[in-house]
Image: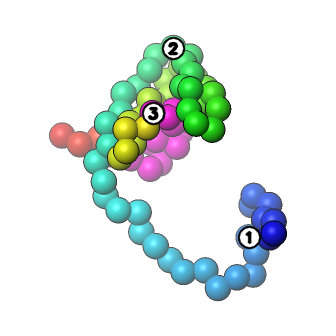
Amino acid sequence: MKSFKSFEIPELDFKEAVKRPIKIRCIQINEPFEVITLEGTMKGKKGDWLMVGITGELYPCANEIFEKTYNICD
C-alpha cells in the first residue's frame, strides 16, 4: 500500500482538474456545533458553515475555507 504525507507532494504525473460549479445548500452557524457523519463526529466553530452535500450529507466547513472556496448565489 502506498502512503502519502500531507503537504509532501510526491513526484507523480499529476493532472489538473477544475471543480464543477455545483450549487449546494449552506448556512453559517453562530455557535459551536457538531455533525455526526459516517466518518465520525465533526466539529464546527462559531462562524463556520453547515453544508448540505450533493447526496444530502451534512458536514461543517471552516469559515476560512468557505471564503476561499465558495461564493454565495443571489
Q: Which residue is mark 2?
A: 31
Disc nearer the start of the sequence (3/1) = 1
- Residue 58's tag is 3
Q: Position of residue 18 (x, y in %)?
A: 42, 69
Element carrying mark 3 = strand
Q: Nearer the viewer, residue 71 or 32?
A: 32
Q: Position of residue 19 (x, y in %)?
A: 41, 63
> Distance from label 3 to label 1 (Cα)?
29 Å
Part of the protein shown in magenta: 58-70
Image quarter hosting the C terminus: top left
Q: Say if residue 63 shows up in the picture.
A: no
Q: Is residue 13 above or below residue 73?
A: below
Q: Amino acid at mark 1?
A: Ile
Q: Which residue is mark 1?
A: 9
Q: Amino acid at mark 2?
A: Glu
Residue at x-position 35% and y-position 46%:
54
Disc nearer the start of the sequence (3/2) = 2
Element carrying mark 1 = loop
Asked if the magenta segment contains residue 71, the reply would be no
Disc nearer the start of the sequence (1/2) = 1
Q: Farthest residue toward the bottom?
A: 13
